[in-house]
Image (spheres, helix red, strand yellow):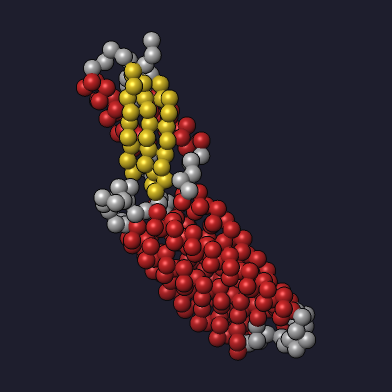
């Protein structure tokens, strides 16, 4: 159910971005609004990486095989990282284009249709952001999290476009391309944040100490465990593979040690839903 729900978010977001791209580019050209046109280019970018994320989401669901014993979850993270790079580059282009246009002496006030299209975009994106955000928090999908973040940036970017268009229609014409520059800044900042988040997983970064300490406390509560000297977590996509070492009394039999290890594994799996598997090493406690 979780993957079906996440996939539904991605498909719906892709369809919405296609519709909004056509609307904003068409109206942006007809209404002579640089800010709305920049926002339309942003939607075109959204289509690109929404499709990439949707494809990666399906590939990441493939089960583990001989060459990929941890599964294919990092495909989703890799594509999210590439999408973040494209987001950042596009934001930079919009900043450059907006600055150049603001010095154009032949600027003209955008038409009222630009405001209507921008307002409709904000309403659509608010609905999509609430939906994607709730699914992301519940199922911990990096793909859906990227999609939700993109919807939020679109809301802020289009809000800036509304202000730029409105002020330009009041007679301050350079505010329209200035709005495009600010939208580019929003896009760049989003790209940077997504790059930082996904590169941690790709570089196998250690999760937060708070996360590991909670798992240690959970393992210590298992009957027969005296200490938890080491714990390591290996991130793969939305999940973690955990390796943990526990010490037990040295006079226990092999079977008793094995039973304790199984108990630790089950307790940890019940304690944290993001664990895909747990490997428990049992060592005798030093006298």
- 133 up-or-down from 46: above or below: above
Q: Residue at x 37, y 35 (%)?
A: 243
On screen, residue 222 versus residue 78, left or right, reads: left
**Residue occupying image coordinates x 62% and y 60%:** 189
- Residue 171 location, x and y as percent? 77, 83
Visible in this render: residue 119? Answer: no
Q: Nearer the viewer, residue 58 or 205?
A: 205
> Where residue 52 sits: x, y (%)?
42, 67
The foreground one among 265 and 114 is 265
173 to the left or right of 117: right
Look at the picture and state if 220 lies above or below 85. above
Determine which quarter of the picture holds residue 35: bottom right
Looking at the rendered image, the quarter that the C terminus falls into is top left
Q: Looking at this view, name the residue that lies furthest to the front.
A: 67
Residue 260 appearing in the image: yes
Image location of residue 276, percent across then percent down: 33, 44
Vertical position of residue 50 compared to residue 26: above or below = above
Residue 168 screen position, x and y as percent: 73, 80
Q: Which residue sits furthest top?
A: 287
**Residue drawn at point x = 33 percent, y = 61 percent:** 59
- Total numbered labels placed on residues in the image: 0
Q: Quadrant of the N terminus?
A: bottom left
Q: Indicate left or right for 153 with 206 as reference.
A: right
Tell me which corner region of the image, top left, top right, bottom left or bottom right, holds residue 165. Answer: bottom right
Among all residues in the image, which is located at the extreme left?
255
Front residue of 28 and 54: 54
* Residue at (51% x, 52% y) in the render: 199
């Amino acid at each position: 159910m979780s993957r079906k729900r996440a996939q539904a978010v991605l498909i719906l977001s892709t369809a919405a971005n296609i519709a909004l791209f056509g609307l904003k580019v068409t109206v942006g050209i007809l209404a002579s609004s640089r800010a709305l046109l920049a926002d339309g280019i942003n939607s075109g970018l959204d289509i690109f990486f929404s499709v990439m994320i949707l494809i990666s989401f399906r590939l990441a669901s493939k089960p583990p095989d001989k060459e990929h014993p941890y599964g294919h979850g990092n495909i989703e993270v890799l594509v999210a990282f590439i999408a973040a790079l494209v987001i950042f580059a596009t934001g930079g282009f919009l900043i450059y284009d907006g600055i150049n246009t603001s010095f154009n002496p032949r600027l003209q006030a955008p038409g009222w249709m630009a405001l209507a299209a921008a307002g409709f975009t904000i309403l659509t994106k608010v609905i999509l952001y609430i939906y994607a955000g709730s699914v992301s928090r519940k199922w911990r999908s990096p793909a859906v999290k990227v999609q939700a973040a993109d919807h939020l940036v679109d809301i802020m970017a289009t809000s800036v476009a509304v202000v730029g268009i409105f002020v330009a229609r009041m007679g301050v014409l350079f505010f329209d391309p200035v709005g495009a520059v600010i939208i580019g800044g929003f896009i760049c900042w989003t790209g940077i944040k997504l790059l930082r988040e996904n590169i941690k997983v790709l570089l196998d970064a250690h999760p937060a100490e708070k996360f590991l300490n909670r798992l240690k406390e959970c393992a210590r509560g298992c009957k027969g465990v005296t200490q938890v000297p080491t714990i390591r977590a290996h991130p793969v996509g939305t999940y973690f593979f955990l390796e943990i070492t526990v010490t037990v009394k040295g006079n226990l039999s092999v079977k008793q040690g094995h039973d304790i290890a199984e108990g630790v594994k089950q307790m940890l799996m019940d304690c944290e839903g993001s664990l895909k598997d747990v490997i428990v090493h049992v060592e005798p406690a030093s006298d």
